[in-house]
Amino acid sequence: MLKAINALLAVLGGVGGALALYFLLNKLVEVLPPRWEERLKPYVFVFPAMLFVTLFLVYPAVRTAIFSFFDDRGENFVGLDNYTSLLGESAFLNTLFNNALWLIIVPAGVVIAGLIVAVLADQLRTRGENFVKSMIFLPMAISFVGASTIWRFVYAFAPEGRPQIGLLNAVWTSAGFEPVAWIQVDAARFNSFLLMVIMIWLQTGFAMVLLSAAIKSVPAETLEAARIDGASEMQIFFQVVVPQIWGTVITVFITVLILTMKIFDIIYVMTGGRANTDVIGNRFITELINFGRDGRASAIVVMLMLAVIPVMIYQVRRFRATEGAR
């Protein structure tokens, strides 16, 4: 009960403090002559946000980049040794390859699954549509750690003769087959694919909502014109609907792509990076927490930031181009 009260007071204090701050700043600016008030008011309201972004994003990023050139304890300058040692390790190169697989498969899988669900759910109409979409969107309310815990029970394995608490093995053995250890040490990339299923399951609802709204906004006149011209429903979807919602498809793809670059929760809970499933995010946690290698962990973060920046620049430019065309 005490924790709940503390949390409530923290929320009220944070919201109330923000309101009080902006109210005070607004009153101070209103005291100035009208000419200066008009000039300074936008900066006054933007300044607190910029201050917090600088303190909690920009400053830590710069410090992390600096630490990446120092040793494990952040005391002695070692230049590019952290980068060269990481890129020279076969284990880290395997981690990069796993990340590449995630980036190739997960965003595409989310977009495809979201499109399929959006199209099929739109055919149900009214209450049926709303219910199905709510159920598909429901996993978005679950944290990555919670979802991973759920899927640990889905993939759970027990030797033959013992009760199978895992959903897959319960179904598998009821069909007369022997139980399968789905997460195996020597299963090559198959383990990573099993973990990718969790991410796709979590993000399909997000893709469905955006893509369904985009599909509903397609003018009915273009669909009717295509049907009059003799186009099949499949041709209408791929040649009429998809080109008109392509901007939304790219937005969903890039959003999931950025999220996938930073993924570590699923791997940390499911395997801890074992069984050939490690990714950059989890490797960072391993280097920093398990081994105390601050320099190498910082180098991993810098490489991850460098990988995200081009995607962010593309997304910002595409957004500006879209807004300029309206």
Image: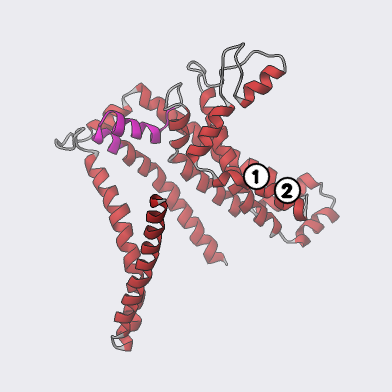
Quarter residue 307 falls in:
top left
Between residue 312 and residue 269, name the one nearer to us. Answer: 269
For the record, the magenta segment spans: 278-299
Q: Which residue is mark 1?
A: 136
Marks 1/2: CA–CA distance: 10 Å
**Helix or strand or loop: what does disc 2 sit on?**
helix
Between residue 11 and residue 304, name the one nearer to us. Answer: 11
Q: Considering the image in quadrants, where does the C terminus appear?
A: bottom right
**Helix or strand or loop: what does disc 1 sit on?**
helix
- Picture layout, residue 177 above or below residue 14: above
Query: Does the magenta segment cover residue 191?
Result: no
Q: Residue at x 78, y 50 (%)?
A: 124
Q: Residue at x 76, y 54 (%)?
A: 127
Q: Which residue of the protein is positioned furthest toward the bottom in this rendering?
A: 33
The image's mark for residue 121 is 2
Residue 273 as seen in the image, left or right of residue 53: right
Q: Residue at x 42, y 50 (%)?
A: 1
- Residue 40 lies, in percent from the top left, at 31, 78
Between residue 12 and residue 85, name the one nearer to us. Answer: 12
Mark in front: 1 vs 2: 1
- Picture layout, residue 326 above or below residue 187: below
Q: Main secondary structure of the magenta part?
A: helix
Query: Does the magenta segment cover residue 281?
Result: yes
Q: Dots 1 and 2: beta carbons under 8 Å?
A: yes
- Picture layout, residue 216 above or below residue 193: below
Label 2: how many Cα within 10 Å (few below 14, some 14–19, many 20+): many
- Residue 312 lies, in percent from the top left, at 43, 50
Between residue 3 and residue 284, name the one nearer to us. Answer: 3
Residue 42 as seen in the image, left or right of residue 188: left
